[in-house]
């Protein structure tokens, strides 16, 4: 065979091998992509749907004072805090009640004994918000949808009820003297209505609405919220930006038995789920978010 023909044959074989290899690589590449896509689809199909967190069921009983004071387990700090929260009272008034609401277990996180959910997706864009429930006499503090504090409160009595409304935190004082009665000392006081004289602060919690329109708290909760919530921003005497939003919601059923006593027969009677919180917040959400934007813009201008 002539040498030129031999070289041509070798070249032909080389091109054929390269061509077959390239085609094989392409096919493998296509197959790999299809395999990867199928794998991703299968993985997505396997991802479980998010289910709402359901609080464990706690059963309650109403125990006469003469009986529960004899039980040693009620004397621990953890037990006392839970009992005070359930009965919407403080440790001093707890011992004065004729009977108290008692759970069948004390091993759960504190928040499981009260009304608000641990997370609310609707509040993810809200930096901070406080919600006070007048019907259930409890409050909750949320940061970007996450519950950071919850506790009992005693709001305004029937003759001076706390008006349901969207408020904002204004000024605060470690210790204030009430303008209504000079004997009322308000510790860790945070005003939310400058002309209405409404705020939240530490004061006695008898276990029912008893204030002159303010939201009473335990000392621990009042101290926490005093340091957690943001004050208003003033430009001279003019309001430049609102403080932390505060929603006071609903109406207390004056003249009826305490709502939390319904827990004896209906353990889930006082539970707010995410939908409940969304319904409470929705009417005010645009106002809250717009105020939040304004505050951030103001802070940027001040520090720039």
Image (cartoon, rainbow, N blue to C red):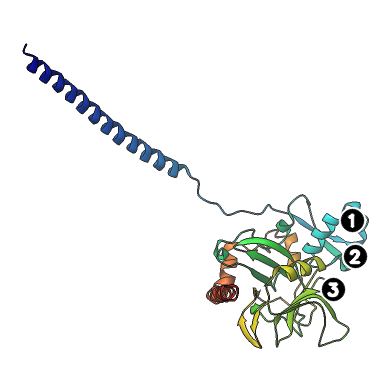
Q: Looking at the picture, does residue 189 appear above or below residue 43?
A: below
Q: Which residue is mark 1?
A: 75
Q: Quadrant of the N terminus?
A: top left
Q: State yes or no: discs 3 and 1 in contact (Cβ < 8 Å).
A: no
Q: Quadrant of the C terminus?
A: bottom right
Q: Looking at the picture, does residue 194 appear above or below residue 56?
A: below
Residue found at x 17% / y 25%: 15
Q: Residues within 10 Å of mark 3 (few under 14, many from 20)?
A: some
Q: Is residue 36 visible?
A: yes
Residue found at x 84% / y 67%: 90
Disc ID at residue 95: 2
Left or right of residue 283, residue 66 in this image: right
Label 2 to label 3, Cα distance in Å?
Answer: 13 Å
Q: Which residue is mark 3?
A: 204
Q: Secondary structure at mark 3?
A: loop
Q: Residues within 10 Å of mark 1 (few under 14, many from 20)?
A: few
Left or right of residue 124, residue 134 in this image: right
Whole-percent x, y for residue 50 in the image: 53, 51
Residue found at x 56% / y 67%: 278
Residue 206 lies in quadrant: bottom right
Residue placed most toward the observer, 267 or 164: 164
Q: Secondary structure at mark 1?
A: helix
Q: Looking at the picture, does residue 193 appear above or below residue 5?
A: below
Q: Looking at the picture, does residue 246 appear above or below residue 266?
A: below
Whole-percent x, y for residue 70 in the image: 93, 55
Q: Earlier in the sequence, mark 2 or mark 1?
A: 1
């Amino acid at each position: 065979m002539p040498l030129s023909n031999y070289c041509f044959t070798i070249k032909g074989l080389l091109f054929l091998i390269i061509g077959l290899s390239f085609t094989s690589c392409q096919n493998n590449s296509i197959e790999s992509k299809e395999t990867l896509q199928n794998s991703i689809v299968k993985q997505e199909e396997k991802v479980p749907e998010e289910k709402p967190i359901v609080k464990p069921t706690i059963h309650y009983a109403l125990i006469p004072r003469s009986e529960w004071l004899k039980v040693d387990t009620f004397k621990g700090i953890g037990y006392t805090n839970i009992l005070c929260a359930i009965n919407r009272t403080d440790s001093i008034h707890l011992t004065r009640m004729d009977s108290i609401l008692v759970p069948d277990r004390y091993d759960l996180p504190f928040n499981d004994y009260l009304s608000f959910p641990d997370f609310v997706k609707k509040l993810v864009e809200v930096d901070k918000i406080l919600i006070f429930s007048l019907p259930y006499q409890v409050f909750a503090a949320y940061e970007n949808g996450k519950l950071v504090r919850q506790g009992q409160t005693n709001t305004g009595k029937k003759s001076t009820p706390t008006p349901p409304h969207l408020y904002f935190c204004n000024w605060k004082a470690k210790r204030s003297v009430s303008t209504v009665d000079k004997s009322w000392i308000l510790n860790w006081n945070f005003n939310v209505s400058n002309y209405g004289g409404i705020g939240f602060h530490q004061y006695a919690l008898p276990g029912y609405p008893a204030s002159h329109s303010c939201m009473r708290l335990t000392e621990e909760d009042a101290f926490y919220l005093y340091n957690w919530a943001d004050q208003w921003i003033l430009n001279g005497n003019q309001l430049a930006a609102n403080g932390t939003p505060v929603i006071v919601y609903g109406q207390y059923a004056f003249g009826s038995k305490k709502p939390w006593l319904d827990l004896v027969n209906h353990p889930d009677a006082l539970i707010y789920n995410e939908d409940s919180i969304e319904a409470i917040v929705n009417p005010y959400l645009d106002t809250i978010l717009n105020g939040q934007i304004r505050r951030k813009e103001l802070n940027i201008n001040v520090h720039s």
